[in-house]
Amino acid sequence: MTSPFRRSVSEHRAGLKDIIEKALGNPGTEILALDRALGRTLATPIAAPRSLPPWDNSQMDGYAVNTADLGPESLRVVAPIAAGIAAPALQPGTAAPIMTGAPVPAGANTVIPIEAAEPDRFPGEAETASGFRVRLPAIAEPGSYIRATGSDIAAGDPVLAAGTRLGPTSLGLLAGLGIGEVAVLRRPAVLLLSTGDELVAPGTELAPGQIHDANTTMLAAALESAGCAVTTVGVLDDSPESFMASLGQALEAGERSYRLVLSSGGISMGAFDVVKEVLINHGIEFGSVAMQPGGPQGAGILGLPGHAPVAFIAFPGNPVSAFVSYEMFLRPALAELLGLPERQQLLATLTEEVASMPHKVQIRRGSYSGGVFTPMGGASSHLLAALAGSNSFILIDEDTTVLPAGSPVQVLIIGDGS
């Protein structure tokens, strides 16, 4: 049995990062169609297989002409060019009605908007057949209103780097280049569990002394949005025998080989903190981090008889403590591996005085808007409504006991679903 650790925030963050890198550092790859790749991390770099646009096309409705034919005389109008059809070469002395997105015909080097033509309309088929003519401005720049081949991206150019998290715009670019599937990192399989005899699933009626389990839903959503494949087993019993049996069953080889187990609850100083009581003998270290909320923490490589070693991280059970622990420790460790954007940090002005406990980093929830941070919910670690209403944290260092209203504070933006 190891002695309880006492760590700083930075020490524990580094320790968890090391565990996560060893557990998840080689997730493997899989090929997915674009419609299944949203939010996934690109495994290999992609270069453009073709130019975009693939050919010169019109930027607006108008007439495709050659600038050499412009002058005082009107031009004979030929058959129109619609988007999606091949364009015949433009004959000298003629103008071709062209629609937005249609290919510019060989022989044309500019497009005159329909609004600049006289008359400012396209002729009907019968008018074209009878020799309809149009007067256009005498001067136009070659290339005007033409989207040139490769003006967006040229064939062979780098498109997306390995490690890119695929969103709507990057997937749209791949689709526009004709790429139908991509190699992405496999989502690391995470087993998520909560402990506490007082916890019952949402949608269940409460008996005296019971509360609904918020952590499973909250942490599962955070992990899924970060790019993990999460399996939940709900709330495990607080008796050591039942906990070990349930954990062993959950780890049984099945569809997934778990890379990480995350638990919440059962790691403080109470008489029924079963996670610490049982797993301290199986490779998991428990102790405290100089942080509030979220001081009690556990981590290590779990070695249960009959099961492959697996990374195990234990968060405290209060919902705010669990979510702060995710943001401070687990998400940063996942970010580099899974291509998550780093949390934005901004300077803000504090709207009201905040008192802080000495010798611990205080994480306070609140609302950031327009350069101002308004605290919400105080220091208590059970206030879910205040957490749900927050979009940011401030971190108060160990040596600060009071921050007056008007103080400059560093704000960590959260709440974007990942």
Image: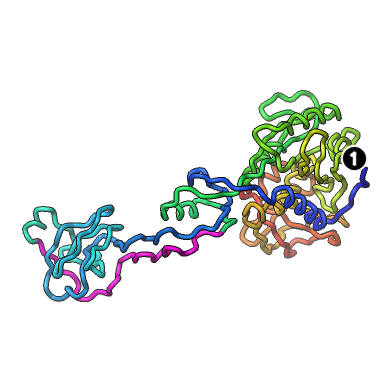
Q: Position of residue 21 (x, y in %)?
A: 72, 52
User: Looking at the magenta stretch, what is its main secondary structure?
Assistant: loop
The correct choice, above or below, for 207 with respect to 144 in the image is: above
Q: Is residue 347 visible?
A: yes
Residue 212 in view of the camera: no
- Image location of residue 152, percent across then percent down: 41, 63
Closest to the observer: 238 or 213? 238
Verify whether residue 137 appears in magenta.
yes
The kind of residue on which mark 1 rests is Met
Q: In which quarter of the image is the N terminus?
A: top right
Q: Residue 338 at x, y = what percent?
A: 64, 52
Q: Does the magenta stretch include residue 166?
A: no
Dot 1: what SS? loop
Task: Tell me which segment is drawn in magenta.
Answer: 132-161
Number of residues whose C-alpha sits closer than 10 Å to that of mark 1, classed few (under 14), some (14–19) or many (20 or more): few
State left or right for residue 212 relative to residue 105. right
16 relative to 94, above or below = above
Q: Which residue is drawn at 61% across and 60% down?
A: 370
Instruction: Tell me: 277 left or right of 181.
Output: right
Q: Mark 1 points at which residue?
A: 269
Q: Is 123 displayed left or right of 295 in the figure? A: left
Residue 117 x %, y %: 19, 66
Q: Is 276 or 400 nearer to us in this picture?
A: 276
Residue 380 position by quadrant: top right
